[in-house]
Amino acid sequence: MRGIRVAVLAIVGSSLMAGCGGDNPTTLRVMAASSLTGAFAEVEAAFELAVPDVDVVMITSSSSSLAAQIVDGADVDVFASADEEQFERAADARTFDPPRVFATNSLVIIVPPGNPRDVRTVDDLARDDVLVATASEDVPIRRYTDRLLAMAGVTANFVTFEANVSGIVTKVATGAADAGIVYVSDLVGADVEGVDVPSQLDVVARYPIAAATNSSRAELARRFVDFTMSADGRAILVANGFTAP
Amino acid sequence: MNRRHPDRPPRAARWLAAVTVVFFCLPFVGLLWKTPWSRLLDVVTDESGRRALWLSMRTSVLAALLSVVFGVPLAWVLATSRFRGRNLIRALCLISMVLPPVVGGISLLFSLGRTGLIGRWLDDWFGFRFTFSSWGVVVAQVFVAMPFLVLTVEGALRQADTRLAEAARTLGATPWYAFRRVTIPSISGALIAGTVLAWARAFGEFGATITFAGNYPGTTRTLSIETYVALESDPGRSMALSVLMVGISFVVLVTLRDRWLGAERSS
Amino acid sequence: MTLRVDALVRRADFVLRVELTVESGQRLAIVGPNGAGKTTLLKCIAGLLPVNEGSISLDGGVLDDADTDQFVPPERRDVSVVFQDYLLFEHLSVLENVAFGPRARGARRSEARERARELVATVGLSDLSERRARALSGGQRQRVALIRALATRPRLLLLDEPLAAIDSSARGELRSTLERQVEGFDGTTLLVSHDPADVEALADRVIVLSAGNVVWDGPVSESGWRIR
């Protein structure tokens, strides 16, 4: 019994100690839209290399989910959203620097490898035999999708409203759904084929980014924002399928 | 040692138990405190809420029943057979309890999805799809919930007195008749507990459902998915839905009687 | 109802080797020290344990034959057992327990219950017909176990220490009940018991088993000191 007590104290003690002590890197909390996952992983690595003593903690999820968390009081230093609407929602609850659009993304229709239902145009998405996956309302990709479909005058055959873009990609990549609309950047590394959207229907997704102002890490946060907008940052974004304005 | 209650656990144990009870109650207290009560009526009367509730109820009950139909024979085989690889088989059948539900959903997608191993055959020959259908919801729920029943029932069968079934055999009962009329009644407590547990898991299931069956109102948007979706756009609604789910689950679990969980005590 | 056993059964601690013929209507007692193989022998005859070598047959019909790999499962043998612990079905009533055998063999519910009622009356438990088995006293359980075994009209009745769990004061009366039932039973009876009084009352012939072998075989009147 005594041995167990000593062991428990040792474990509790050492975990408490792990938190204190000097030489700790500053933690920078970055929330980014899920479509930025791949690109921002590289940005994170490059930033940590360029700036000493910083540990970037990357939180990716649908922008609507992130905005909800920020409204709920989540601690954040940088927010990169997939649309301006979700950013404004977050900005209502927390003060940010004025947002800057650091990347844009176009939409693309994705189909499973081999395009089993032979989807070639936006009109094909209305066919009964084509099962289309999209996201729930509030997720930015859905708004962009709705806008595109409205412009084309098409009512798509939606069979599911996924929680985020990766859900759409999974459904299409596994062949469960016959088509979906996602960002061009999502084509990178995904097991899907892309079908171009005609340029007159092109809906451009605009990604705003900004640092939260009243935080001890505001300076570091601004450096991160500047980095994403620098030549290095833009190169990474372009390599991942985005367009950097 | 207490003179009047010599059976009572020692004080330290009771204190720890009290702390644990508080741990479990706290989230619900928090939920009930913050929930806007006016919304509670809304969520059960608006169409979206009612559809999700009805879907969750019918799929989870069906999933529980299927878990019994398929899980009890499996438990019987696992408890009584002695073949090589039995431990491996058991582990495979129970693994979905430990896996993140989303992983379960993805696995189902690759096997029963439209391009999956079996799924493509179902689609080609019968035009039948699990994905995006309520049946997909049931399958996802059975996949995550059945192991709870199998584990409970197998444990009880191992402890059950096999001599009773032997006695039944000597009286003329076939093994199946003996199992049905003698063995099952002798483990009725564990069977009920296992079924309720499986139902509860099915009712609360989210990750595997949304990954395998999708998210479509009325067809695949269960109450848990509805709650999650509401969280981002309308937190008040989400809280009201949470209270609803907690309430339903609580009512079911509270009917689980002591005497069903413990061994029968002869008078 | 002639039982023929010529078999070998390997167990953990001993090898049971028995060659035995029990004529129709005979009442045989099997006695011997603990671990001699008495229960094993009963289990083999009941079909709860297969023999390793040899065979068991009843009225010429094979129940178990290791050489030709024939085995009749217990539910298809006309052999009933009164177990040492009675093994009543606790969740069923007295009547349902007794009716269990006939029902399992395909009788209609009403028929089975009728037969059960008759038997329950013969042991004076009619008042307790609907009582759950778990609520019965030791002596009542013993009687129910007995008539439950008789309900299927077996050709062979096996009694494994039928009165061992009974208080010595109550034993006498129950033994008389047992004796009456066994006398009224027209099949063959095998009894395992440590109690000489049981053997006297319920058997005409005795075999003594020791370490898996039959060491003595003869009428009850001559058995004397051998029955401990």
Image (spheres, rainbow, N blue to C red):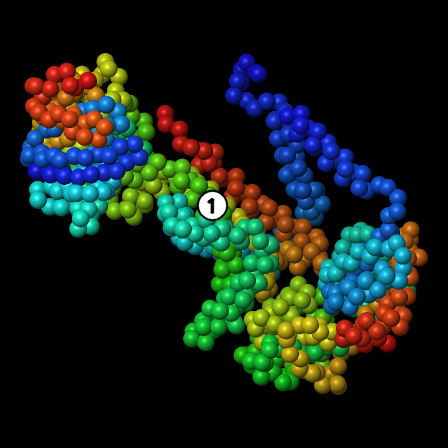
Q: Quarter of the image containing the N terminus of chain A?
A: top right
Q: Is residue B126 left or right of residue C227?
A: right
> Mark 1 — on which chain does it sit?
B
Query: Image quadrant of residue A125?
Result: bottom right
Residue C153 visible to the viewer: no
Could you say which is closer to the camera, residue C55 or residue C150?
A: C55
Which residue is under mark 1?
B151
Q: Is residue B64 left or right of residue B249?
A: left
- Among all residues in the image, which is located at the extreme right? A219
Above or below residue C90? Residue A179 is below
Residue visible at 75% across and 85% down? A199
Above or below residue C116? Residue C202 is above
User: Where is residue B96 drawn, in percent x and y?
Assistant: 53, 53
Above or below residue C128? Residue B110 is below
User: Where is residue C14 drawn, in percent x and y?
Assistant: 26, 32
Secondary structure, mark 1, is helix
Could you say which is closer to the camera, residue A46 or residue A205?
A: A46
